Amino acid sequence: MVGLVSTLVVILLLLFGFPLWLVFLSSGFALLTLSQAGIPPDMLASRMFSSLNVYALLAVPGFIFAAELMVRGGMSRRLVDWVTVLLGKVPGGVPVTTIAASEVFGAISGSSTATVAGIGKVLYPGLRQSGYTENFSLGLITSMGAIAVIVPPSITMILYGAVASASVGQLFLAGFGPAVLIGLIVTAYSVWYSLRHSIATRQLGWNAEAFWLATRRAAWTLGAPVIIFGGIYSGFFTPTEASVVLCVYALIVTVAIYRDLSLKGVWDVALESALLTGKIFTIVAAASVFSLVLVIESIPESIVGMLLAWEMSPFMILLMLNVVLLIAGMFMDPNSAIVVLVPLLLPIALAAGVDVIHFGIIMTVNLAIGMFTPPFGLNLFVSSSIFNVSASRIIKGVLPFIAIYVLALMMVTYVPWISMWLPNLAG
């Protein structure tokens, strides 16, 4: 009864356009009213505070601020120039450049929307001038922005680690395999598309002198992932400390070295980053109320018991979890989905014998797909704003890439080695 009412309340509030934090908070109070557990109201306020009192969450504002600095401070533009020169003359040269640049920039920023903005503004004109259709160009940029949710340092992974009490460092390692796999599959499709439509590359052949000049210009940008991952996996600092180091590094590079960002620009970036961080943390705190009542009412345990009674195979359980997550990703942003769904779905995954790290990657890939899946994929609206086109036109472009990502998701789900080989290697 409680589970049915909670589901109806959430659906109704979403249909009426209520903000997510209010949806979760209202649903939590509705559940509390029906609950027989006798939870005092002041416990909810304590729960909201304690949900944010998590060390790993300190990394979120750091990576958000650093990503915005890099987009506005010229670091993303220099990165794109370097990747363009590195790839040289290959079939599908500009799309392949877009894919590689998205992977690298996502590995620096950890922000999907920042990747769409930073890479899209630079490479969209090149895609169109090279002869690629508007649908393909918009679909590629919008979908590849979502790779930042998967490739570390991912804010979604940080939140999952905090909610599931999982190692963020292990999650970061596990994210590399799926991110590379998706990049390779999208690259294969892009090359096929280029050859199928007889689109000749307009890039110059590889030139050692040009590569050296581009490397010199992008050297400070390329140093960012070296510092982040070298520091984390050498044990010099934690992922949370890495976010602060990246902020300081990006600030020095964009203001003092590249000089593309003024102090006024830094202030504007700080305000926007604080606003976005506040939105994320408000949703996290409100969603914790909803998840608390679910746990107290033993709803996750009831679902696990029901599945065990049905004697569903691990294969079918994973398939069901993927369907649930794909649907959730269509309506919720990854951060909200993590806070709400991890307490509900993680016990099911563990009962099916899925490793907590592997399930974190399955959730992350699912929710990354939701970033560019209609009706409410955030990247759709970011691209619409950046390129001044309707969301419906972007949706047409992303459809082939949704299929590609789902193919990669199935491989990641049923071949755990793709995610787990690096964490297992690191011990």
Image (spheres, grey):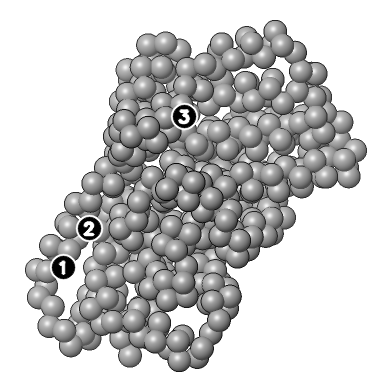
The quarter of the picture where the N terminus appears is bottom left
Q: Quadrant of residue 122?
A: top right
Q: Quadrant of residue 351?
A: bottom left
Q: Which of 35 and 89 lies nearest the eye of the viewer?
A: 89
> For mark 1, what is the residue?
44
Left or right: residue 217 versus residue 11 is right
Pointers 2 and 1 in contact (CB under 8 A)? no
| Amino acid under disc 3 | Pro
> For mark 3, what is the residue?
225
| Amino acid under disc 2 | Ser
Secondary structure beneath dot 3 equals helix
In primary-sequence order, the first of circles 2 and 1 is: 1
Residue 327 at what x, y percent from top left?
53, 69
Residue 217 at what x, y percent from top left?
55, 13
Q: Quadrant of residue 392?
A: bottom right
> Where 74 sits versus 336, above or below?
above
Secondary structure beneath dot 2 equals helix
Viewer-side label of 2, 1: 2
Residue at image point 44% right, 63% down: 355
Viewer-side label of 2, 3: 3
> For mark 2, what is the residue?
51
In primary-sequence order, the first of circles 3 and 1 is: 1
Residue at image point 64% right, 48% down: 181
Residue at image point 31% right, 30% down: 236
For the question of whether residue 320 can be seen, the reply is no
